[in-house]
Amino acid sequence: MVDPITVAINATLISALYALVAIGFTLIFGVGGVLNFAHGALITVGAYGAHIAVNLYGYSMGVGIVAGILAAAAIGAVLYLGLIQFIEDQPVTVLIVTLIAGFILQHAIGHFFQSQITLPQVFGGSIGLMGYSGQTNMVFVFASSWLIIFALVGFINYTKPGKAVMALSMTTKGASLVGINQRKINLLTWAIAAGFAGFAGVMLTTFQTGGAGMGLEPLVLSFAIVVLGGLGSIKGSVVGAYIIGFIETITVSVVSPDLTGLSALVVLVVVLLIRPSGLYGRDTPT
Amino acid sequence: MNRISRRNVLKYTGVAGSTVALAGCSGDDGGAEGAGGNGPSGDDVEEDALAGETIKLGVFTDETAAQMAVDEINADGGLLGADLEVLSGSSDSPADARDDHRELTFQEGVDATFGLFFDPTLRNLMESMAEQQTLHFTTGAAGYEISEVVGDDYDLYKYHFRVGPINSMQLARAQVEFLELYAADLGWDRVGFLIEDLSSFNPFEEEMARAENELDHIEVVYNEVLSQGLSNWTPVYDELEAEDADVALVTQALSGTAAAQQWVNQERPFDFGGIHVPSQFDAFWDEIEGTPEYIFTMNAMTPQTDNTPLTQPFVEDYADRTGSVPIYSAPIMYDAVRLYAQAVGEVGTTDAETLIPHIEEMTFEESTWLPEIEFHGPDGEFPHDVKWTCMEACDDPAGVPVWQQWQANDDGNGVMEAFAPPENATTEFERPDWV
């Protein structure tokens, strides 16, 4: 039987990464009012971006992280510029198109690259605290994820483009009236969200094994998280990530590792039945 | 070559003549006759009984190894005057293999087929073997259930023989034997069994439960069947660590790389290995970030072992041809083709109905991985599977499976050394400093 404190430590560490993935997902909904089901594929893009830099070209993991973020952000931007901007006022069409785009991306990656990839840990070994130990790499994943979340909050609250993102998420008309270039801000949002997914993909591959289909599980998790937290709410995503992260970790640690992802789906169904708007969110699009 | 016409010719004309001087020929001379065979055997076979013909072999996997055996036989004058030819079949999917098997047997008229690594693919071929009444020699798939299929309807499925590896039930027994003999020496008091949910590994849960009951010197702290798709091994390793396990004794194929990678990454304080299929491949050393040093697995042979006097010559020839070292199924394929050639040489025909009783009785002493190859008969425990006694702890031990461990050589490159059993050991067991 795994020690409850160990389970709690693991849940705390991994939930930060879940929050990061979910925030990227909810950001696009908050600003553009659309659901991006290619978000999981962007996690894969990030992982393979780092794989190319580190394993194929021999760069350090620092370069690999940057490469993963940039690769995903670039693909996110291309998705917006090449597809989404033409249909962004049709949420259902966007949902279908992003779903298809995600499949295409994953299949393309699976076709052109090896099916399983691994990345070195950013930091090896483990560190102890009050008699309990955690993987140093997971502590880095936790700390860096929170750093990025705080940076995003700072960006939104204290920079002009960030405030434009916030304004657009509140009211499209109002944002237009004050001269905000909606398309430009949407593009920025897609690139940032994709960059978050890319970072998550790199981090996931440092402690699990990556592959073309690696984005599906985090996509399901992040979808459950943002529905629980409330679509469009960053605060809701963080709270939702920790609730789902704890439920998920307890399930796989105490019940069975084979149940990975199942608890999130159960939570998703329950939330949709009881409180469709989630903890902090606005109503789901109709 | 027209198999039907040749069969009829041989059947109705009979053949008498001189001895077949085939290297390694040591079969039971009376086997075919004694077992009910209807063809000539041993001294009755003419040296050029098949002169001018081409014996076609359909090969699904390890084509290089099959070609090596064929080249040797052809260079030595062929088989009773006939040349051997390899025709390739696909094993990309069970459906592809079945289609190719039908094409090879029905249209190309191959005399026997060889290979296959995955049990589902092999199972899918059994009907086609029965329909076409063509011998098949398995050289990689290990699921013991195929022998049950042969035994349950012998007349229909008698065309299947497993030249190697030893089947999954025998592998599970070998793992129990290994624990019995080596757990104390390796310092393993508390053992965790991690078994992948794969049909080939069906016997393991039961056999490991037997180990738990019968072996007093170990305590089983974890015994779970886990999904093939499990990507996050942290909860499993946390539990093993919480239980103070000394070793994660795994049975893994599809999930093996992820499990190994995470064991390396997380520097878990227990040994890791068992039947770990990915680490039986030479490419495994480069697949794992960091290194897979210290990961151990059962294997039929390794590029470093000397199972028999023919093991290393085969490894070297294979490396000369391909630039890489073989995995275990390659020497088994090499053996399978030569074993088939020995059988044909002894009975003077490629007719399956004549060969089957002879193969059931014959002994092949030129193996690259076993001291000798014989098969269970129709009433044996595993009909038409290669016979295996034990690894080490019996009167007539087979010396396999070998227990291989990845270690770094002086140049820092990965090598697959063996630490057990003693007759095939090339090194001592090592463990990382974090264990």
Image (cartoon, grey):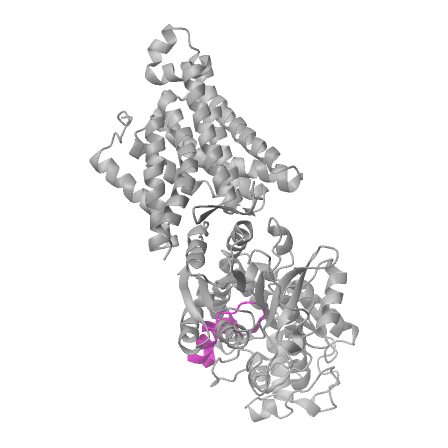
Residue shown at 29% from the left, 39% from the top: A268
Q: Judge by depth and name the residue closer to the eye, B103 or A47.
A: A47
Q: Judge by depth and name the residue closer to the eye, A230 or A38.
A: A230
Residue shown at 45% from the left, 40% from the top: A215
- The residues colored magenta run B129-156
Q: Which residue, as the protein is rendered here, is positioned at the far front?
A: A130
Is B240 inside the magenta-drawn segment?
no
Q: Judge by depth and name the residue closer to the eye, B318 or B425.
A: B425
Image position of B57 (left or right of B134)? right
Above or below, A69 relative to B151 = above
x%, y% of residue B398? 60, 80
Above or below, A178 relative to B300 = above
Residue A42 appears in view: no
The answer to which quarter of the image holds residue B284 is: bottom right
The quadrant the N terminus of chain B occupies is bottom right
Residue B271 appears in view: yes
Above or below, B399 relative to B189 = below
The answer to which quarter of the image holds residue A243 is: top left
Q: Which residue, as the protein is rendered here, is positioned at the far left?
A: A274
Is B130 inside the magenta-drawn segment?
yes
x%, y% of residue B238? 43, 54
Image position of B311 (left or right of A221)? right
x%, y% of residue B248? 49, 62
